[in-house]
Amino acid sequence: MSIIVKRPATLVVNDEERAISVAIENHTWLISPRDLESAIGWELREEGLCRGDVCVPVRDKNLLEVGNDIALDRVAETLRRPFATESDPPMAVIGNPDSGSRLGSESAPNFSLPDIDGNQVSLDDYAGRKRLLLAWSSW
């Protein structure tokens, strides 16, 4: 039996940062069932993933559960939301429900990032002009 060590991480959901405690095992982010609702607003019940009285059916809860924990990537997939992680520092993002539909429209949602001098630059600052987005990762 392996011991899963929890560590602090940041989770971004609905454009809000939340401090959570996770175990990361084989690139799978694991959160305790009791922390799931406070982290993302949904809880795993017999009828599925639920927020209040709205539930998304889950045919096999074993697909979401890893030991005593819940796999966040599988929860996001069930809710049809994009999911992305960064390992150092540990950070995960569960995208908004409409962000997947924008991929097909070729329309990027507005976002802001600091430039090389630390000034915030928004995608909308260049509305009406062609833009090229470059992404890079060390992994």
Image: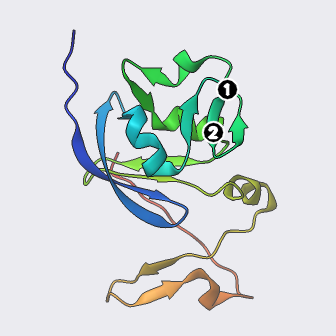
Q: Residue 20 location in percent, x, y?
A: 32, 50
**Quarter location, residue 54:** top right
Position of 112 with respect to 105 (left or right) is left
Mark 2 nearby-residue class (10 Å; few <14, some 14–19, many ≥20): some
The image quadrant where one finds the N terminus is: top left
Residue 47's disc number = 1
Looking at this view, is 22 or 107 the one in front?
Answer: 22
Looking at this view, is 137 or 74 the one in front?
Answer: 74
- Where 12 sits versus 139, above or below? below
Residue at left offset 60%, top offset 90%? 125
- Where 74 sits versus 116, above or below? above
The disc labelled 1 sits on which kind of residue? Glu
Looking at this view, is 48 or 81 the one in front?
Answer: 48
Q: Residue 117 location in percent, x, y?
A: 31, 89
The disc labelled 2 sits on which kind of residue? Cys
Disc 1 element? loop
Q: CA distance from mark 1 to mark 2?
A: 8 Å
Q: Residue 14 location in percent, x, y?
A: 55, 62
- Farthest residue, direction top: 1
Q: Residue 106 location in percent, x, y?
A: 76, 63
* Residue bearing mark 2: 50
Mark 1–mark 2 CB contact (< 8 Å): yes
Residue 36's disc number = none
- Farthest residue, direction right: 105
Residue at left offset 57%, top offset 41%? 76
Disc 2 element? strand
Residue at left offset 25%, top offset 54%? 89
